[in-house]
Image: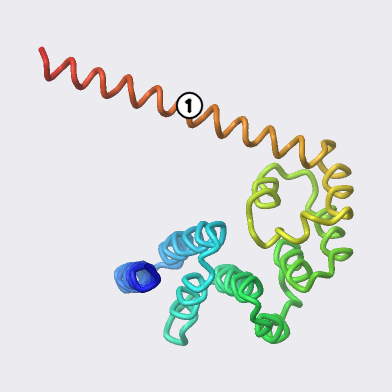
Amino acid sequence: PSMLRSNIENLFVFAIYTFSLLLGKLYKKAEERDNIDGYVIQSMYELLIEKQYETVIRIADHCLQKNQVHSNSDWLMITINKCIALKYSKNESYREIIDKIDWSNCNDEFLLAKYTLLENYTEACKYIQKLGNDEENIISYVEWPLYDLLRETQDFHMTFKKVFGVEFEEKLSQIAEEKSSAFKQSSEELVIADGQDYNKIAS
């Protein structure tokens, strides 16, 4: 089983790397390359949720090779995801990576990530307040493994309620209900569509 899992991980890393490499050669415009990086970053995000840390590290290593071109924000996001994977793999080298980054021109989202990774939760919560009541950030606070340890702190829960006007657990339940409802609706639509296709064939 461990060998099979390793082979699957190797195939997955190879597929993502080859996909991004080939598209990178086909599409030269900056916005097109950003779309490719967006696909890779989303894949890393989902792998982090599944705790596939080694796979995330290997994808990041491929993407961060010297011959790869990324926007500053995409490079930072890939690097941060790698640091998350290293941290939860008990590999302290993520601190060296963070120390080498020039954070002077980074926006608040990236500074929040920096302080969260370094477990400076007082500073992290200050940036949550600075970012304000942005609904797009809520999903990250709920799902992104970057915030796993931060979510366990009282400071986070107090800050979340102050910023969003609702308890974190209440928002968590609301999001879970919305996802369940959306999944149910999608399943019902699929059943209806299958039934219509069957009727067409039968007639």
Number of labels in the image equals 1
38 versus 190 height, above or below = below
Name the residue beneath numbered marker 1: 184
Mark 1: amino acid: Lys
Between residues 51 and 123, which one lies in front from this camera angle?
51
176 versus 3 height, above or below = above
Q: Position of residue 37 (x, y in %)?
A: 46, 65
Q: Quadrant of the C terminus?
A: top left
| Residue at 70% from the left image edge and 51% from the top image edge | 141
Q: Is residue 40 left or right of residue 51?
A: left
For label 1, the crowd category at 10 Å Cα-Cα, with few meaning under 14, some 14 to 19 and many 20 or more, is few
Q: Position of residue 43 (x, y in %)?
A: 47, 60
Residue sitting farthest toward the top: 203
Between residues 85 and 115, which one lies in front from this camera angle?
85
Q: Is residue 44 left or right of residue 146?
A: left
**Location of residue 26 (image quadrant):** bottom left
Q: Is residue 78 left or right of residue 29?
A: right
Q: Quadrant of the N terminus?
A: bottom left
Q: Position of residue 142 (x, y in %)?
A: 68, 48
**Location of residue 79 (image quadrant):** bottom right
Q: What element does badge 1 sit on?
A: helix
Q: Is residue 26 left or right of residue 121?
A: left
| Residue at 55% from the left image edge and 62% from the top image edge | 51
| Residue at 73% from the left image edge and 70% from the top image edge | 117
